[in-house]
Amino acid sequence: MATLEPERAKLDTTTPNEGRIADYFLGGKDNFAADRAAAEHALAIAPELPALAREGRRFLGRAVRFLAEAGIRQFIDIGCGLPTQGNVHEIAHSIAPDARVVYIDNDPMVVVHGQALLQDNERTVVIEADARDPARMLTHPGLTSMIDLDEPVAILLFAVLHSLPDDDVATHVVTHLRKAIAPGSYVALSHAVSDLCPKKTAKLAAVYQAQGTITGGRRGNLRTKAEVERFFDGLDLVEPGVVYLPLWRPGDDLHHSPDSTWVVGGVGRKPRRPREGPAFTRS
């Protein structure tokens, strides 16, 4: 596959940005008129989007907590979005104060905001990079000064891959990351899927692509759950596997029925020996 060299994102307040739209869904204030208009357009199709955004944050919290309790002390949060409550470093540091966290986003606004908030945190850094160029991302000086890729690390891809509709690009990103991390590392991801409401998600995909909030290819609908599961090829899936978010180790954190949550998530561990496809592991 040819080397990907995406253009550097520029701060454009007149074009909707998916991260700022998510901020609006979560009740944040770091968004602009174009983001709010795009969000309201999407809400007219799927009023449950704010609830899905909150489920995504809850899954993030449970997954990061699991990873920290499993002994991971290095976290790379790709496509981190604007800071909100319950960020990766807050959850990880509540369990392991020595954990190191690198936040990555290609939105200059996200990066500047995050750097300002975390400038006094010696174990957390925010860098500007593009997930579509994983080789350059993993060699960024801000990342290499904080993360040792020869040691286990958690790669976090929460609500990122559905923003890459080109399957070749998304697969390239995940494959490169999986090969780059040490055995014993983890990949955690969440992804909106089309299985439960294909007509609604097709309309949303068309809207987001027309607005330019999703770039780098077009497709008629979101990926299916089965297609998302393929991103875990070569990894041992942590139980319960790739499931709708409310079903991933909910404990007392169950808020919505899986039937109304069309986002799946999962966590996979890189084994000592390469595998052809995902396998289950008890952790």
Image (cartoon, rainbow, N blue to C red):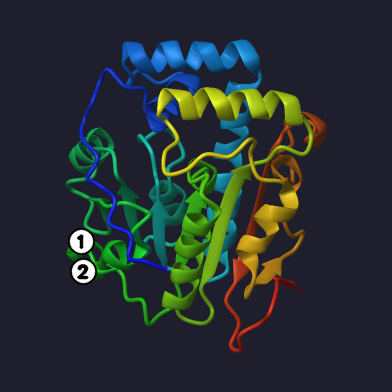
- On the image, the x and y values in percent for residue 196 come to 79, 34
Residue drawn 33% across the image and 59% down it: 4
Task: Please name whichever residue, 253 or 188, is drawn nearer the observer in this view of the structure.
Answer: 188
The label number, if any, that marks residue 8 in the structure image = none
Q: Are marks 1 and 2 in contact (CB under 8 Å)?
A: yes
Is the N terminus in the top left, top right, bottom left or bottom right quadrant?
A: bottom left
Residue drawn 37% across the image and 82% down it: 150
Instruction: Tell me if residue 77 comes above or below residue 208 in the rendering.
Output: below
Label 1 belongs to which residue? Answer: 142
Q: Give, as a three-letter code, the residue at label 2.
A: Ser
- On the image, the x and y values in percent for residue 259 come to 82, 32
| Label 1 residue SS | helix
Label 2 belongs to which residue? Answer: 145
Would you say 238 lies left or right of 171 here?
Answer: right
Would you say 248 lies left or right of 13 here?
Answer: right
Task: Please name whichever residue, 88 or 238, is drawn nearer the observer in this view of the structure.
Answer: 238
Task: Please name whichever residue, 181 or 98, is drawn nearer the observer in this view of the structure.
Answer: 181
Image quadrant assignment for residue 188: bottom right
Q: Give, as a three-letter code, the residue at label 1.
A: Gly
Disc 2 crowd rating (10 Å Cα; few below 14, some 14-19, many 20+) is few
